């Protein structure tokens, strides 16, 4: 056990790679590959729980489970560690992976060995991003994610899969180029002769203002492309529409969160003074995301596009939480990432179950589906209520904390009106419109698909299968749990989140 605890994170990354290697030598039969992938995914989930419950102390802000191995001399090392922020994202990935594999049964009948091997490689790259503490290793793992994701869309996607995969590739490549330039600039300007993120974060704060601003902008561009944020969001709806259901679940559930994680880990952790300078503009960008994407949802006829634009809108709350420069805002942004990962995965799964039976995602083709698929209706309603932030569901917690943080933030200064609102309060008022619009498009979607006149051509449809119920109930039980008892999640990351807020507070105190 001691050996495992000393090498827990490296084992966490090696296990899915080992799974990919073993699957590559199996017979090319879907049940065998899926069952073995599921075994590996459950092992990863068990490892995540062991890491959290064995000796991880959520009260500490310092890095834990630190592993440090030489790679290219002392300059580039394999340094792995977790704190509250990263362990929260690791847990989310560990939860989503087995349900994604269960949901893959109808999709992976073609080339199952390749499909499940790519899924395992994707797992290593995403987990690696969350535990890497060497900036060059962080960049390599960030870029590695591009390869399996491209093929998962291009091989198993819809009619325009090549276009969507290429667009994803181009946007992700541009994001990676921005990060690579920032990493090299930070490395050479610091003179630290190391890519250790702890060391570089200290050097970054003492760099000349121009270098800090340039690095911040490059990193921020990379992360908001992945998040995604206006005006770099157009790749996401296309990718979601063409990606198979399980890949959409992972894309919305965890891959978008890599962008949010990067903002917290690097933009906030390395350049708090630049964050303070640009907070107002980030808040404006957040509001544009929240409202603009919600409006876009109202004019879509494709269910996947509705959920895709909804994801863009909800990621705006992450930006608003960061821009608030408050403990509640930071905490709410992290909670929102985790909660949205569960909710969006459930919604894409539900849309996928409808598409598998009807071969259409056009909302106008549906109607009266409650009679034919009552279980699907009940679960779709629950997921929709969580998406529109109904109290007692997890979606409510993250958005409420972000609103509270932004509303109570006095850093923006007073807005020049006779009402004496500060800018944070103005942002909350406009963002609340996004919440109203979310209720509008989610209820409209429910009404158009499940209510109204029955479409008799769907009368022979079967309701949800057992495997589909397992996936959906697993996700939605967690949505209820974290909505009713949010401290069970927030206690994991709040000390780390508070430490980031304190670093920003020191800058504000000096200004």
Image (cartoon, rainbow, N blue to C red):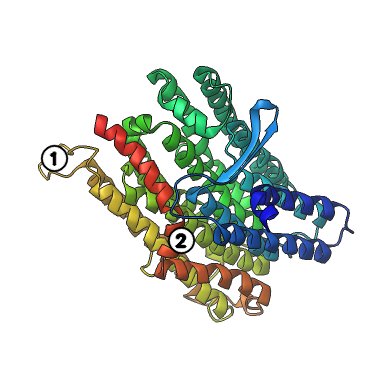
Q: Dividing the picture into quarters, in which one does residue 288 lie?
A: top left
Quadrant where the image shows the N terminus: bottom right
User: Where residue 26 appears, x then y in whole percent?
Assistant: 88, 57
Question: Vertical placement of 207 versus 289: above or below?
Answer: above
Q: Dividing the picture into quarters, in which one does residue 457 lie?
A: bottom right
The residue nearer to you, when weighing 395 against 265, is 265
Name the residue at 62% across, 79% down. Answer: 459
Where is mark 2, residue-wise? 489
Question: Vertical placement of 19 versus 457: above or below?
Answer: above
Q: Find out whether the residues at labels 2 and 1 contact each other: C-beta distance under 8 Å.
A: no
Alpha carbons under labels 2 and 1: distance apart: 39 Å
- Secondary structure under badge 2? helix
Label ID, residue 5: none
Task: Inspect this view and state whether residue 379 appears.
Answer: yes
Question: Vertical placement of 366 versus 193: above or below?
Answer: below
Name the residue at 90% across, 59% down. Answer: 27
Task: Inspect this view and state whether residue 362 appears.
Answer: no
Name the residue at 56% across, 60% down. Answer: 345
User: Where residue 422 appears, x then y in whole percent?
Assistant: 19, 42
Mark toward the start of the polypeptide (2 vs 1): 1
Quadrant where the image shows the C terminus: top left
Tally the numbered discs.
Answer: 2
Assess disc 1: are there few (<14), some (14-19) or many (≥20) residues with their C-alpha within 10 Å of its C-alpha.
Answer: few
User: Where residue 148 appears, x then y in whole percent?
Assistant: 71, 45
The residue nearer to you, when weighing 364 against 370, is 370
Name the residue at 38% across, 20% down. Answer: 209
Assess disc 2: are there few (<14), some (14-19) or many (≥20) residues with their C-alpha within 10 Å of its C-alpha.
Answer: some
Where is mark 1, residue-wise? 417
User: Where residue 404 appears, x then y in whole percent?
Assistant: 28, 54
- Secondary structure under badge 1? loop
């Amino acid at each position: 056990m001691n050996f495992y605890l000393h090498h827990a994170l490296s084992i966490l990354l090696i296990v899915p790679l080992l799974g990919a290697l073993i699957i590559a030598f199996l017979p090319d039969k879907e049940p065998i590959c899926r069952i073995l992938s599921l075994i590996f995914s459950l092992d990863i989930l068990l490892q995540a729980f062991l890491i959290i419950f064995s000796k991880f102390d959520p009260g500490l802000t310092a890095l834990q489970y630190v592993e440090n191995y030489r790679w290219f001399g002392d300059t580039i090392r394999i340094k792995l560690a977790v704190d509250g922020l990263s362990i929260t994202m690791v847990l989310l990935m560990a939860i989503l992976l087995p349900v994604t594999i269960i949901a893959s049964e109808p999709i992976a009948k073609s080339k199952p060995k390749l499909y499940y091997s790519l899924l395992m490689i994707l797992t290593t790259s995403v987990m690696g991003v969350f535990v890497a503490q060497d900036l060059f290793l962080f960049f390599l793992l960030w870029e590695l994610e591009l390869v399996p994701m491209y093929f998962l869309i291009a091989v198993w996607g819809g009619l325009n899969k090549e276009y969507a995969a290429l667009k994803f590739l181009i946007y992700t490549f541009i994001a990676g180029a921005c990060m690579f330039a920032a990493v090299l600039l930070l490395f050479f300007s610091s003179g630290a002769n190391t890519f250790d993120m702890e060391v570089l974060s200290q050097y970054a704060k003492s760099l000349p203002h121009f270098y800090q601003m340039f690095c911040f902008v490059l990193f921020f561009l990379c992360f908001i492309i992945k998040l995604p944020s206006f005006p770099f969001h157009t790749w996401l709806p296309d990718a979601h529409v063409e990606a198979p259901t399980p890949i959409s679940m992972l894309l919305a559930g965890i891959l978008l969160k890599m962008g949010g994680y990067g903002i917290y880990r690097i933009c906030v952790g390395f350049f708090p003074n630049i964050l303070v300078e640009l907070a107002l503009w980030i808040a404006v960008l957040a509001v544009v995301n929240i409202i603009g994407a919600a409006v876009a949802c109202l004019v879509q006829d494709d269910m996947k596009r509705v959920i895709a634009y909804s994801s863009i809108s909800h990621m705006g709350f992450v930006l608003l939480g960061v821009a608030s420069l408050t403990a509640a805002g930071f905490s709410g942004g992290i909670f929102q990432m985790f909660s949205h990962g569960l909710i969006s995965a459930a919604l894409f799964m539900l849309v996928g179950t409808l598409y598998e039976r009807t071969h259409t995602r056009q909302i106008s083709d549906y109607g009266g589906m409650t009679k034919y698929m009552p279980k699907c209706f009940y679960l779709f309603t629950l997921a929709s209520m969580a998406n529109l932030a109904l109290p007692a569901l997890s979606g409510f917690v993250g958005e409420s904390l972000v609103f509270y943080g932004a509303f109570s933030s006095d850093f923006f200064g007073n807005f020049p009106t006779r009402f004496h609102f500060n800018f944070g309060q103005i942002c909350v008022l406009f963002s609340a419109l996004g919440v109203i619009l979310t209720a509008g498009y989610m209820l409209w979607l429910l009404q158009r698909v499940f209510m109204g006149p029955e479409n008799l051509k769907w009368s022979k449809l079967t309701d949800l299968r057992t495997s589909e119920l397992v996936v959906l109930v697993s996700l939605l039980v967690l949505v209820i749990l974290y909505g009713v008892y949010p401290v069970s999640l927030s206690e994991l990351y709040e000390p780390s989140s508070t430490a980031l807020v304190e670093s920003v507070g020191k800058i504000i105190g000096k200004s």
